[in-house]
């Protein structure tokens, strides 16, 4: 095989392994859903005056989507790649005719597919349980955000792998990187509760910009197509940073032993 | 198939490989022996295209591994020292995954059959025993139908019966016309499988040849030993038997290049009742004896 069929082949097996892995399914699929239910039952009846009086649940749907996409892209890529590298499978794959770009594309395809699925799932739960409106006019912006976000967080996952020494350290290192940013970027706590200084700090990193794009797409008062070009630009720039770091530091051979 | 001349490789000022020459012919099983840290893995990594060298000429399948491309990679198979297959894929799926990387792969069911995993085809890799996982590894190495296979310590950690089974599989590769480059710690493995062997020690090749001739083994004296008889030994008989005589740990040891004559004389005396030959042993120097001598005794870490 070569070209696109080869990418699809790689993607198909990535999917197979993903859905068979209890840890991957729990943390990427179940975890965000549980968070949505918890946050909505705790704060569901509040409204956020600073954001034009939207309901807290309308705020949390894009927030949880952010969590799910970062998890499907950055977290699961970093954990999976570390396991592949330390088990010797990455080195082994490098010794086959599979071109590295096809391997990366298969990984990206997996992250993107799971991300789309999570957007649909979280949006549907939001609609059914909490009456959160489904975006219509902003769907192109939503899809573009998803595409750029999957790419950015995948490349960051590849880059992060270079700094993870072994399989045991992988979940700890990735969560150490993303978990504080969920809180500081307004994904878990509404922005109006977060001091400006903290928001300025979290604006350095991609998660906040990613979330802002989704928030606009889901905000019922948004008029027009809802493209947040500024946020998308910074998100894409981080993708470039991840790409360059990966090209420089990513390695196919095990670090231990 | 493989041609190496004057290979040099250093890590941080330490010369791991200091001028290695190797020739491997098409269709042979070549065993590369040496203690840990002798430069074995470094040499193999250069041949496989994973490591850049400092100096020397290297040609594998007519190409420099440093410029390896897809076509070259599709002609080579690997069994790495450490590799765990995906525990969530079964044997058949694992082979289907790798088969998809090649233009003309072998048949998946046939390859499973070849390594003796037919009954485990639907078992997940994570549920296989160590020996079965290694055989799956060999199957993955074969799936692209390569001309040349690198097997890096393929039976390390096997129990004796698993080792025998693996040897059958590797020996069978010769019948398929494959060229096999095998690294191993086990001399009996090299003896059983290899057409030719080379021994590396401290970064240089110290001996090369067939397993039977390595390090002058073909001409080395045979050792005959038996428990020292209470009656003692007559000088006359020693002369008639020939060879050089000595005593070690309560045993008489005769080293001779004419073992037939010595044995004839000794057993003749024994059947006459003139000599007790308790626990008689005849031994040719093993590959291991030669190897230990070449690599500086039992200092293998």
Image (cartoon, rainbow, N blue to C red):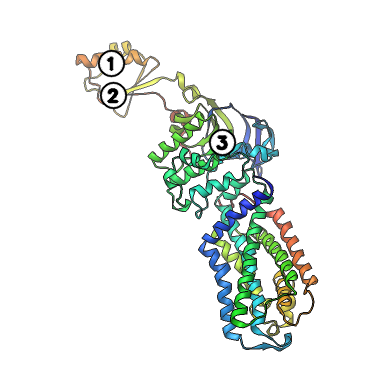
Q: In the visual, does A69 lie left or right of B287? A: right
Q: Quadrant of residue B69?
A: top right
Spatial distance from mark 1 to mark 2, Cα to Cα? Answer: 10 Å
Closer to the eye: label 3 or 1: 3
Quarter holding residue A71: bottom right
Assign the N terminus of chain A to one quadrant of the image.
top right
Residue displayed at 60% across by 86% down: A43
* Total residue callouts: 3
Same-chain status of marks 1 and 2: yes
State which mark lies toward you, 3 or 2: 3
Residue beneath the point at 24% across and 24% down: B278
Above or below: residue B271 compared with residue A93: above
Return the residue at label 2. Answer: B280
Residue B149 is tagged as 3
Name the N-terminal-most of marks 1 and 2. 1
Q: Is residue B165 left or right of residue A163?
A: left
Dot 3, crowdedness within 10 Å: few (<14), some or many (≥20)?
A: many
| Depth check, front residue: B239 or A196 | A196
Question: Is the Cβ of the residue at disc 1 closer than 8 Å to that at disc 2?
Answer: yes
Q: What is the crowding at mark 1: few (fewer than 14 residues within 10 Å), some, or many (at least 20)?
A: some
**Residue A207 in the image: above or below residue A76:** below
Query: Percent position (x, y) of residue B252?
Result: 31, 23
Give the labeled residue for mark 1: B266
Mark 3, chain letter?
B
Q: CA distance from mark 3 to mark 2?
A: 43 Å
Dot 1 falls on which chain? B
Q: Which residue is at a point 67% across and 59% down the rendered structure image?
A: A159
| Front residue of B136 and B58 | B136
Badge 2 crowding class, 10 Å Cα cut-off, few under 14, some 14 to 19, many 20 or more, is few
């Amino acid at each position: 095989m070569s070209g696109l069929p080869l990418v699809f082949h790689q993607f198909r097996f990535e999917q197979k392994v993903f859905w068979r892995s209890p840890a991957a399914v729990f943390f990427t699929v179940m975890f965000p859903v549980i968070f949505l239910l918890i946050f909505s039952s705790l704060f569901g009846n509040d409204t956020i005056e600073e954001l034009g009086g939207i309901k807290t649940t309308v705020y949390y749907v894009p927030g949880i989507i952010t969590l799910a996409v970062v998890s499907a892209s950055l977290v699961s890529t970093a954990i999976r790649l570390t396991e592949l590298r330390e088990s010797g499978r990455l080195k082994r794959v490098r010794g086959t005719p599979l071109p590295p770009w096809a391997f990366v594309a298969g990984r990206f395809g997996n992250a993107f597919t799971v991300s789309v699925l999570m957007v649909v799932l979280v949006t549907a739960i939001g609609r059914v349980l909490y009456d959160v409106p489904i975006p219509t006019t902003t769907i192109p912006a939503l899809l573009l955000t998803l595409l750029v976000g999957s790419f950015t967080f995948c490349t960051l996952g590849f880059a992060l792998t270079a700094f993870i020494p072994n399989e045991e350290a992988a979940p700890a290192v990735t969560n150490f990187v993303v978990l504080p940013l969920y809180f500081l970027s307004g994904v878990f706590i509404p922005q109006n509760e977060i001091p400006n200084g903290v928001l300025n700090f979290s604006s350095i990193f991609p998660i906040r910009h990613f979330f802002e794009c989704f928030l606009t797409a889901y905000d019922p008062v948004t008029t027009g197509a809802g493209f947040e070009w500024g946020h998308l630009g910074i998100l894409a720039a981080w993708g470039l940073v991840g790409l360059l770091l990966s090209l420089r530091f990513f390695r196919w051979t095990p670090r231990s032993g | 198939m493989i041609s190496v001349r004057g290979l040099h490789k250093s890590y941080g000022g330490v010369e791991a490989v200091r001028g290695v020459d190797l020739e491997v012919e098409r269709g042979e099983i070549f065993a590369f022996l040496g203690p840990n840290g002798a430069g074995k893995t470094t040499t193999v990594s250069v041949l496989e295209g994973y490591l850049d060298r400092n100096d020397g000429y290297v040609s594998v399948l007519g190409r420099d591994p440093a410029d390896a491309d897809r076509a070259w990679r599709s002609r080579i198979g690997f069994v790495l020292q450490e590799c765990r297959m995906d525990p969530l894929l079964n044997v058949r799926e694992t082979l289907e995954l790798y088969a998809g990387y090649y233009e003309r792969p072998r048949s998946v069911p046939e390859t499973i059959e070849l390594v003796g995993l037919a009954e485990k085809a639907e078992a997940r890799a994570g549920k296989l025993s160590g020996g079965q996982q290694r055989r799956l590894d060999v199957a993955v190495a074969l799936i692209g139908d390569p001309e040349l296979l690198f097997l890096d310590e393929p039976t390390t950690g096997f129990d004796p019966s698993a080792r025998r089974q693996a040897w059958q599989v590797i020996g069978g590769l010769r019948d398929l016309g494959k060229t096999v480059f095998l690294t191993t710690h086990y001399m009996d493995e090299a003896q059983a499988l290899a057409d030719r062997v080379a021994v590396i020690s401290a970064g240089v090749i110290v001996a090369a040849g067939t397993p039977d001739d390595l390090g002058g083994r073909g001409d080395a004296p045979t050792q005959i030993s038996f428990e020292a008889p209470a009656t003692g030994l007559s000088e006359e008989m020693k002369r008639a038997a020939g060879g050089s005589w000595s005593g070690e740990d309560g045993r008489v040891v005769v080293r001779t290049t004419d073992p037939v004559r010595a044995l004839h004389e000794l057993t003749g005396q024994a059947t006459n009742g003139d000599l007790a030959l308790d626990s008689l042993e005849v031994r040719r120097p093993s590959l291991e004896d030669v190897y230990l001598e070449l690599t500086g005794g039992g200092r293998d870490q």
